[in-house]
Amino acid sequence: MNYVFILLAFLTGVAISIQAGVNANLRQTLGNPVLAAAVSFGSGFLSLAIALLFMRVPLPALDTIRQVSWWKWTGGLIGAVYVTTVIISVPRIGTANLVSLSVAGQLLAAVVLDHYGLLGFAQHPANAWRLLGLLLIVGGVLLVVRN
């Protein structure tokens, strides 16, 4: 098992909780959740554009871009909906509730995607251990949200 990627995955979870608070505060300052999400995505876009320039990543050919299926372009849209939902929800339900519910939703979707091998994922059956893990996460979410 590659512990570097396990650590990175954990730190990503930490970052998502921090991002929720940062973006909620940005919304409070700017006065609009969609504007705050746009600013958040704008700064992310600029960061990635600068990284690509330094890495000197070549752009794909126009024919390659035209061959991309429509649904493969929806990742940014899903991210925009997620970030905007976080910005709107965190002040009302709190970071712990939002993150725990998000993780439960992510895990449920991941188990289904893996089980059926959807979206090009390798197929990993939803065995008893995975389902038990999912139930334990849902139980943990119920305890967190119950406060």
Image (spheres, rainbow, N blue to C red):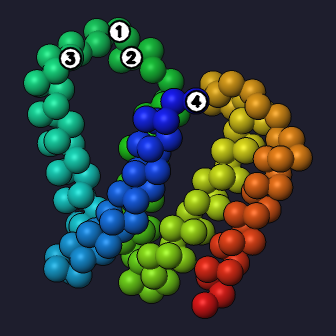
Q: Residue under circle 1?
A: 63
> Neighbour class for label 3 at 10 Å: few (<14), some, many (≥20)?
few
Residue 110: where, in percent of width, then height?
66, 44
At label 3, which amino acid type do we have? Val
Query: Quick one: label 4 or label 3, which is nearer the N terminus?
Result: 4
Callout 4: SS: loop
> Neighbour class for label 1 at 10 Å: few (<14), some, many (≥20)?
few
Front residue of this view, candidates 18 and 86: 18
For residue 47, what is the image quadrant? Answer: top left
- Please identify, in this view, whether the residue under mark 4 or under mark 3 is nearer the observer: 4
> Neighbour class for label 2 at 10 Å: few (<14), some, many (≥20)?
few
Front residue of this view, candidates 6 and 76: 6
At label 2, which amino acid type do we have? Arg
State whether residue 12 is above or below residue 5: below
Front residue of this view, candidates 6 and 111: 6
Q: Residue under circle 4?
A: 1
